[in-house]
Amino acid sequence: MKLTAVLMSLFLIIFLSVGVALADGNNAYSDLLGVLKAKGVLDQQAYDNLKKSEAASPAPAAGTLGLLDVLKKKGVISEEDYNRISKEAVPAPAQVVSKTAPATVQTAQTSPASSPAPVAAERPLNGALTNFEDGFARLTGDRVRLKIRAFFQAGWLYDDSGISVGRPPTGQISDTSDNTFFARRAKLFFSGRIFKKIGFMISMDGTTSPLLSDAYAYLDYIPHARVTLGQFKTPFSVEQLMSTGAIPTVNRSLVTNMIANPQQRDVGVMLSGAYRIKGRPLGAGYATGVFNGNGTNNVDDNNRKDWIGRVWINPFVEGLTLGGSWYTGETRAKTGDHNHDHQKWGADFEYAPSMVKGLRTMGEFEWERRYYDTYVSKDVFNTSKPDAFGKYAHTFGYYLEAWYRVNGISGPASFLNAFEPVIRYDFLDEATSGVANDRDRWTFGANYYINRYVRVMANWEVIHAESGLAKNSLEKIDLKSHNLFTTLLQIKF
């Protein structure tokens, strides 16, 4: 209820701010157009058309109605608010003027980690402006910018083995049902900047316990170097660093779930940066940090901190990125009073060939040496402890995937431009004993983008498991060959 109250208050602030802006007359209206253009809500064509409309009719209502048309078509304001504000802007029917046809509006793409957009010169409305883009709202002032976003995923799965063995997509395992509905993500993001060079991010997921996912601040005072402190994703594995809302498949790869995800988020401090040569496919970046090494929302359980790092390069090939990750630290045994070494490394690539627009490929290899004395995941089979308990496992795996966003189709079949077929092959060897304990999987998928905020996904996964997994696996999922069909609805704004 408290969160609902906060959101309702923010919406009231938004609509009151817009209402005040529209009531300030021609000067306020001109100021509002300038700030909306600077913030990326209006492109140059829309701005020019609205300015011409303003000049052609000095009555404040003329420009107001034209701007309202643009904001309504963009989805910034609802039909109800459009009608209400239109009536307030036009006190009598005789004052209604013809509206300028709105031009295409392009929304600026931003992220908590990006540099702030150029800010217009000081204007009376600047401190109270509410700018809608890629989220609930973005409140912008002279020194502080706050953005609120939301992310939701839910779906249905069917497992022909008779056991829903997904971690993910469900985070839970059932030994009594072969199909289930599930809600995988229900996240809120609060991000912003203070004095341009200080930023922060807080995110919460209602489907997990504890709720807190990210809680960090960053400083941008050093050129090409950002200092990040708090709880956030560690810089290991290209797929892990991608949001589940950005990966082309419903589930991450086997190797990412087994090796990278146990330390997906951690508490620590990180230095990162990137540099690209303008006009050339050449650039490089890095991220390296010191972390507790004990996972999300946990304090350290030993005196040694873990070191994690990642580098990437664009090597003179348009659309190609090569990367590498490494991890070294210690893990404390759940039984006993001593620590054990923990190492892992990975190599990856991403390639979006310029000659085939819409095509993307990605692949990764990961290796890990880790001491085990507890299961990584829930044991639904109640087996005796694996032979690997009390010793080191040398786990490795890889994946290759490609996806293609259909484009360039016009006419009646233009709806196919929102279609995206996906294919992936991945492999995992836990290397926990001398017996065969491998898994491999083919994933065939299709995504459809209803609009920029909504994606519908369907995946058919064909999983093959070696017979030794049931006894020796440390992961305790996908312990036998089976097929998994998953559908997912994603909303992100």
Image: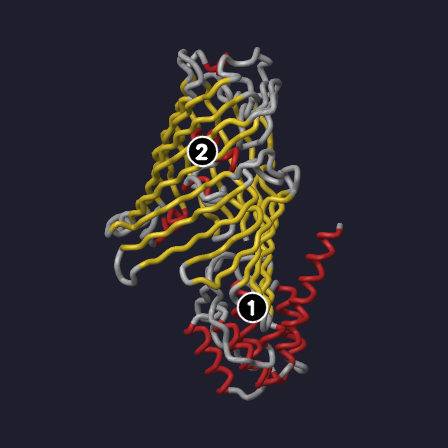
Query: Taking 214 as reference, is 170 above or below it?
Result: above
> How many other residues sit within 10 Å of disc 1, few (<14), some (14-19) or many (≥20)?
few
Residue 447, visible in the rendered structure:
no
Q: Is residue 196 above or below residue 348?
A: below
Name the amino acid, label 2. Thr
Estimate the x, y position of residue 346 in percent, counting from the top left. Answer: 38, 36
> Which amino acid type is marked by label 1?
Phe
Direction from residue 50 to residue 5 in the image, left or right: right
Horizontally, residue 403 falls left or right of residue 29, namely left
Crowding at dot 2, Cα within 10 Å, few <14 / some 14-19 / many 20+, comes out as many
Which quarter of the figure has residue 163? Answer: top right
Residue 94: quarter of image: bottom right
- Is residue 97 visible in this depiction of the protein? yes
- In the picture, the disc for residue 195 is 1
Query: Of tags 2 and 1, which is closer to the observer?
Result: 1
SS label for mark 1 = loop
In this view of the protein, which residue sits in the foreground, 252 or 162?
A: 252
Q: Look at the numbered disc 2 and give the secondary structure of its residue.
A: helix
